[in-house]
Image: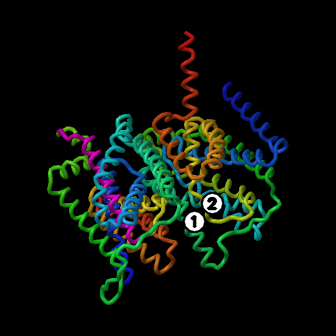
Amino acid sequence: MDILIIGVLLGGAYALMAVGLQLQYGVARIMNLANGEILVAGAFGAFWFFTGSQVSPLITVIGYAPVAFAANWAIYRYLMLPLVRRSKSEGHLEVDSILATFGLSFILVGVMLALFGGEFFSYSFLEKPFDIMGQPYEQNRLVAFLYAAAFCVGLYVWLHRTRMGLTLRAVSVSPEASRRVGIDVAGASALAFGLGGAITAAGGGLLSTFLVFDASIGIIFTMKALVIVIMGGLRDIRGSIVAAFVLGLTETAVASLIDPGLTLAAAYVVFILVLLFRPQGIFGRRAT
Amino acid sequence: MTGTEKTGLAVGAAIFLAAAFVPLLSGGYGLSLAVTVVMYAVLTTSWTLFSGPTHYISLATAAFFGLGMYTVAALIDVFPYPVLLVMATAVGAVLAALIGLATLRLSGVYFVIFTLGLAEMVRQLVTWVQTTMGTSSGLVVLTGIDEPMIYWQLLALAAAVYLASWRIGRSRLGFALRIIGGDEVVARHSGINTAHAKIALFVISGSVAALTGAILAPRWTYVEPVIAFSPMLSFLVVIMALLGGVHRLWGPLLGVIPFTFLWDLVTATFPNQTALMLGLCFLLIVYIIPNGFAGLIENLIRRRPLLAG
């Protein structure tokens, strides 16, 4: 029961970071390996405002969203778009964007190490207990979960009920066809990339309320987000959300039943099962 | 064999012969740097063997290397050293085959992602096995093998890797792989079993990395998971290979030699800024020299007759 509740609560924050990555990969077609560093940057932001000026992380993650959006938009516009333009094939772009975002992730790690040093960081926010079915849990986990859920629902409604959301979904299905019906594909991609980055950063801020982090932990989160996105299928954010809960539960189960040091191994087991049995994702359709 | 190939072979043989005398001329720091250079030459060349033609970026080098090292460290009291080298190679081959079977039938992205966290995952598993078995987190490797011996073994391995790469490049397998790198659909339609070709090459590449780790195990007398599975190794190999240029057999070496010295300098003077430097190198490769130093040199050579005429 413990595992179930903690796993679901963890899955909420994971869903947020994975949805961010999915927007970037699904719409902008960039496999962003710097996703985890954006998340850690968000965590540092929340940490800095909370310890420095007592601002609640719940306010901070909304406050810095425009900054994260602008930064990620600029990354797409000035670093990724030239690669998109020069690439001759999708495979070529894939290699280029993987190397470029990988480079970016190292640069971000370097900058954060220089700013904050290599120690582990954590702070106590809402560490009061609350009861679910007679068992005490920390409040910050519940609050982070509810927050993440609100973000995900909001994003889903936005994607499915507005014209801009429709545009993004059209580009994610086919950039070629979108261009023919007059959609500014580069603009939509930059928008999706920026939005994805802002959501990931918010996820980082929420995770920082109950997880310990350091400047170079981003790659672990990148890995988890990638596993979630592949498990969920590339096109539908509902898939990612379900997959995030699967990963959250698996990790929590492995951590409490076997060893807390094996969480990444747990993610790998899930990943291998997906690759072997449903490489198109839980909700994905098989490519023809 | 054409004339240029004969000259190439002769030059290569001469370089190896000259390199074999390094331990007699220089000890200590010079030799240790030479060991590092040869180690990276082996790792980058075997990496390029697979990732060069296919464009599948493998980030798994550290996992193979670490497993090879651990095989030697864990069983040094049980089996003689030469047997352990064979075992390490086999372990690398089996791991590569498993990864290949799981990921190489699918698109390239899955492969990259899978290899990205592999070293970290294997490290977690090894640490867990060690702690549950109640042993300490490290292993002591005591052998009579000194640094010159390690160097000569690596040099022999390097020669073997270069010869094998050259042979494979001329074989049907190498040809098939270049077609796959050009267009995988075309390759499949012309009757190439793309999954088999990729897995075969990845197995060779992985087992060489494992063997390199095994040869280097005696260099550290105390082997810990953090040392053996350092993910940095995978990234350095990718950078050196791409910096040198992966479309030529001698390309990676052009990246290895300057980068080893640069890296040595940076880790000594700015130990906290290594990540930043790695990042800048990646961007340099993508945006400024996509074909590496080998590409730059070839462009210069090609442009010269134009200027003269």
User: Which residue sits furthest bottom?
Assistant: A134
Crowd around label 2: few <14 · some 14–19 · many ≥20 (10 Å): many
Q: Are marks 2 and 1 in contact (CB under 8 Å)?
A: yes
Crowd around label 1: few <14 · some 14–19 · many ≥20 (10 Å): many
- Counting from the top left corner in percent of width and height, residue A182 is at 18, 38
Q: Which residues are magenta?
A: A182-211
* Secondary structure at numbered mark 2: helix
Magenta: predominant secondary structure element?
Answer: helix
- The label number, if any, that marks residue B66 in the structure image: 2
Say which quarter of the image contains residue A131: bottom left
Question: Residue at image x 35%, y 59%?
Answer: A229
User: Residues under labels 2 and 1: Cα distance?
Assistant: 8 Å
Amino acid type indicated by mark 1: Arg
- Marks 2, 1 in one chain: yes
Question: Residue at image x 35%, y 35%?
Answer: A85
Residue beneath label 1, please?
B123
Say which quarter of the image contains residue A282: bottom left
